[in-house]
Amino acid sequence: MKYPPKQHQDNDIHHIIEVIKTYPLATLISVNNNVPVITHLPLIYEDRKLIGHIDINNPQAELLKDNNEVTLIFSGPQCYISPSIYATSQLPTWNYIKVHLKGRVKANASKIALKKSLITMTEFLEAPDHNYILESDNPRLDKNLKYIEMFEIDITHWEGKFKLSQDKKPKDVEAAREELVRANQDSIKQFLDKIF
């Protein structure tokens, strides 16, 4: 059996981009002296590139330049699937959506580009209601530009992992889809009630 199973791979670029846009918080992985360096930060997709910003004090900032290679993981919804939801006899499983990307990084030292990018990212993340607008003349924004670096990632490899019970009968696939929606809504509330 070939791994990963073909039915759980979705390399349709449009589906992968939709995951990135809907769940923009990436796990960004660099390697320094054979040790992984990991940061979680939102990235914005733009013309087959990802645009991001990092605090200059983050140790990973030094690795996000000079054409260094990075690996990225974007995580969509996920949950345990109980056999009790299926119309046919099945075993327990876990369904999830993940996107794995590889790319090459280059720094963008322009503070003008950084400022514009921060405004654009805020506008994207505020959609669709746009309750907050980051104005270009915001003095706090200007003050903080010296602590932030901008980088771009040219995507070199795309891989979508969409494990959604595709190997089951249509009725069971639909039941797994409904469970994914239900479980994510319920589990977030239960989790937050426990910790916050």
Image: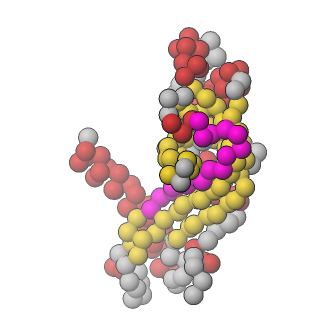
Indicate left or right for 168 with 47 as reference: left
Region in magenta: 62-78
Residue located 50% across and 47% down the image: 37
Up/down of 190 relative to 50, above or below = below
- Tell me which corner region of the image, top left, top right, bottom left or bottom right, holds residue 14: bottom right
Count of numbered badges drawn on the protein: 0
Query: Viewer-proximal residue, 190 or 52?
Result: 52
Indicate left or right for 32 with 66 as reference: left
Res. 74 in view: no
| Image coordinates for residue 16, horizontal then vertical, percent | 64, 58
Indicate left or right for 4 with 117 as reference: left
Query: Viewer-proximal residue, 65 or 172?
Result: 65
Residue located 54% across and 39% down the image: 60
Residue located 61% across and 64% down the image: 160
| Image coordinates for residue 108, horizontal then vertical, percent | 70, 31
Indicate left or right for 69 with 86 as reference: right
> Which residue is situated farthest in the left direction here?
194
Coloured how?
A: secondary structure
Up/down of 121 relative to 195, above or below = above
- Reply yes or no: does residue 169 show up in magenta: no
- Tell me which corner region of the image, top left, top right, bottom left or bottom right, holds residue 139: top right
Query: Viewer-proximal residue, 51 or 19?
Result: 51
- Reply yes or no: does residue 64 show up in magenta: yes
> Which residue is situated farthest in the right direction here?
47
- Tell me which corner region of the image, top left, top right, bottom left or bottom right, holds residue 9: bottom right
Residue located 57% across and 26% down the image: 148
Query: Viewer-proximal residue, 77 or 186?
Result: 77
Which part of the image, by quadrant, shows the C terminus?
top left
| Image coordinates for residue 53, horizontal then vertical, percent | 59, 33
| Image coordinates for residue 66, horizontal then vertical, percent | 70, 40
Res. 83 in view: yes
Which part of the image, by quadrant, shows the N terminus?
bottom right
